[in-house]
Amino acid sequence: MHPRFHTAFSTLPDTLQSALQPYLDAADFPAMFSAEQVEAIKQRCGLDDDALAFALLPLAAACSLTPISQFNVGAIARGVSGNLYFGANMEFSGAPMQQTVHAEQCVVTHAWLRGEAALAAVTVNYTPCGHCRQFMNELNSGGDLRIQLPGRPAATLSHYLPDAFGPRDLEIHTLLMDPADHGHRLALDDALAIAALDAANRSHAPYSQAHSGVALETTDGKIYAGRYAENAAFNPSLPPLQAALILLNMSGGDCRRIRRAVLAEPQSAVLSQQDATRALLAALGCRTLQHLTF
């Protein structure tokens, strides 16, 4: 079991500990449970979907990186597939607070990067801020997404974000988590560059068309790729580096053990991720960034 889970795991009921331990003890536990695993856990514990999501929040919050605030937020997303995904807030010492990833952004992006087609519900241990409500409004789940908070009845995103402004107001029909292939092609033979280009091709940038992706290689040789997730309100957009860091962190990796990185983006785009990507990587101790343009 990853050391970050030890304290939270010890507070769980014995029956839940027993049900979860075989999965958490796996060396490559991906901070998610497949639909089949979810059903097995529920049967052993007698929990329904909502109760299990709430019970898992302490484990999700244990994935937080909070050197600035020391305030850990956990989130659990249930996909329409039945899979459950962990998410947590992430902060980076030495970088502006605008580079922070909120738990809801993390869990949505984690599910997206794992191949989930749409979300049915997001469970979080604190009320989503306005930034996160707007970020989730970009999803193909729309206002029907269920938001679950401790001590409150479940409500939809539309309840938490009434009279919302979103992609449909701008006649955008391909929404966040919809499948995409933007068709950018380059002759590449480096696995890291290939991963970055693939991430750019699957990114969500309907407002700028600045499709971008980042791939990270850690010191153990593992590769984590993230895609740009744009938002109708612009500011809640999540850069591709943060998406890659989400996957790295949720997979149990160390964000300060990045050996090299590749950013793939259009040469003539109206915006570039290069400067922000380079700055955050430098704060994390990585100064090797390849800028790949198409």
Image (cartoon, grey):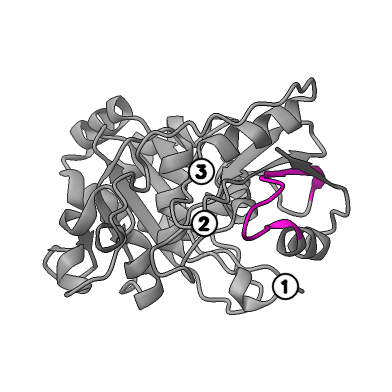
Q: Are marks 3 and 1 in contact (CB under 8 Å)?
A: no
In the depicted structure, whether residue 41 falls above or below residue 7:
above
Between the C-alphas of marks 3 and 1, the distance is 24 Å
- The numbered mark, 2 or 1, whose residue comes first in the sequence reads 1
Q: SS class of the residue under badge 2? A: loop
Asked whether residue 263 is drawn in magenta, I would say yes
Residue 70 placed where, x, y %? 58, 76
Image: magenta residue range: 257-274
Residue sticking out furthest to the front:
268
Query: Mark 2: few, some, or many residues within 10 Å (few <14, many ≥20)?
Result: few
Residue at label 1? Answer: 95
Camera-side mark, 3 or 1 = 3
Callout 3 amino acid: Ser
Residue at x 15% of width, y 44% of height: 48
Residue in the foreground of this view, choosing between 21 and 81: 81
In the depicted structure, whether residue 6 falls above or below residue 82:
below
Callout 2 amino acid: Ser
Residue at label 2? Answer: 208
Residue 248 placed where, x, y %? 63, 45
Query: Mark 3: few, some, or many residues within 10 Å (few <14, many ≥20)?
Result: many
Residue 61 placed where, x, y %? 46, 60
Q: SS class of the residue under badge 1? A: loop
Between the C-alphas of marks 2 and 3, the distance is 12 Å
Residue in the foreground of this view, choosing between 138 and 181: 181
Residue at label 3? Answer: 203
Q: Are marks 2 and 3 in contact (CB under 8 Å)?
A: no
